[in-house]
Image (spheres, rainbow, N blue to C red):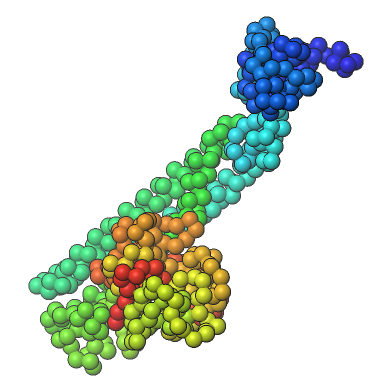
Amino acid sequence: MAAAAGDPSKTLQDEATCSICLDYFCDPVMIIACGHSFCRACIAQCPEGPSRDLSSCPQCRIAFPRGHLRPNRHLANMAEAIQRLRLQSLCLAEGEPKKEAPKLCGKHYEALRLFCLEDRAFICLVCRESRAHKAHVALPIDEAAQDAKDHLQSCLTTLKKERDEILKGKWCSEREIQEMKKRVGSLRTQAAGKWELLDACEEIMKSIDKIASEFSERSSHLAKLIKEAEEMCLKSAFELLKAMDPLLSRCNTEIYGKPKADLNKKVEWLNEKLQLVQTKLCELSAPPKLASPRAGGVPQQLSQQECTSVFVYTASPADYFTPKKGKSKWIRENMVFDPETAHPRYIVSPDGKALWWGNVRQNYPYSSIRFEYARCVLGMWGFSSGKHYWTVDVRNVNHWAVGVARGSVERDREINFEPYEGIWAVGFSRHDQFKALTSPPIYLDPEEGPAQIQVSLNYDAGKVSFYDAEDNTCLFIFDSIDFDGEEVFPFFRIVDSSACLQLCY
């Protein structure tokens, strides 16, 4: 009581505070039997008293007939006046009268001193003790702002490094791009009348222009994001915390959520493609008729002996090889499903080329490498080096996924189909759309997915690529994978009894 008597403002605040919600009175009512007052909403939530018709006072426990309450307008006016006085005193306590007034809690009229990390909201000390925030982590605003600045600075370091690499690559590639344009112009003249080669020249020229545009767009985008982050770091603690979440989300998406397109590798790929056209132009007196890659990929007008000195076109737009001397030899796999790894409800055709989802469990013998819970199956053999590709027909399948998986992937529990579990795959579900199976997923075009999909594994480069096998469009690339010398296997998943996955060759 002595402390209260020495602090009249504290006494006034206590008198204007509801003992149930510990907040200023809002529409107070008085219990006629004992004279105690509470917020109307608070007293309405109190449990019943000795009988259905009686309630008891939360403060003195005296019984009173339910509904015997009287509005306490005098107390309501006093509570409102005390809130205004509290606001005025806070403004004076923060410094000079001309100084900007402190940010106040709209509910408790207390200064906002904390930042709730879970709700991403500014709160006062009273909010901190409330049920809404008591279990949450809250930091003083200055500390939370410093942590946010540190996070932004870390993002800035990564973004600037990526920007510098882009600018360096752009500078190194500009002369190479100009040189390629000259070569294409020369090839156009030499290939007059050779329509397939002319079409290839036109395609290369479009790709050159597209890559040059990508260099500019990428560097401009990064420069804009870096500028926004640098400006954000200069803001006050309050303004920083208030505005930074959308920017941080964009930075994180840029750094972690997007597959990085290696533009320098695209330039190398175009050089390889130019070399292919130039080689064919020198070797062939007439434009050869190319067979479908699925039929062997060998020019029909050339003998097998002649083919050893000519680049052969495979189903991947970036994957060219010479059967004899090529440094980048891609091996086309005649892959089959491994029934010993198949989920118990999978049905594998006798030739191992087709896979169904059965309505009941199959009578398979025990296998220690079988997926007992995860609905998937591996290919019959795996790889620990080299470049390999295979094609899967997924047309009319409503739920599928294809890719590669580590040989050590878990077999005796449910797993998430994502790189963290040792699986690099893309998939489609009729309830969703075509996407890369990452966490979170990355949605791809076309939404309905391709009819046939080619999976290309470059083990030594740590890369898994996916292509539309019908038009050679690159769909998605998992890059910079560390397989750590472990054998990896083709990975397949189907949850659809109305259609089947088919392996092509």
Tell whether 403 sits left or right of 40. left
**Residue 54: quadrant of the picture:** top right
From the top left corner, tell me how far across and down residue 276 is, in percent. 26, 76
Q: Is residue 113 left or right of residue 441?
A: right
Report if residue 36 is visible in the image: yes
**Residue drawn at the location 48% of the way across and 56% of the way down:** 440
Classify residue 410 by image quadrant.
bottom right
Q: Is residue 208 above or below residue 286?
A: above
The front one of 53 and 224 is: 53
Q: Position of residue 98 (x, y in %)?
A: 64, 13
Give percent across and percent down for residue 368. 55, 83
Q: Nearer the viewer, residue 323 or 38?
A: 38
Q: Is residue 290 left or right of residue 112?
A: left
Q: Position of residue 288 (x, y in %)?
A: 15, 81
On-image quarter of the C terminus: bottom left
Question: Looking at the image, which residue is at 20% across and 67% down?
Answer: 201
**Quadrant of the rendering where the N terminus is positioned:** top right
- Label count reads 0
Residue in view at x 50 percent, y 54 percent? 255
Query: Residue placed farthest to the right in the image?
Result: 2
Residue 59 in sight: no
Specify whether 35 is left or right of 243: right
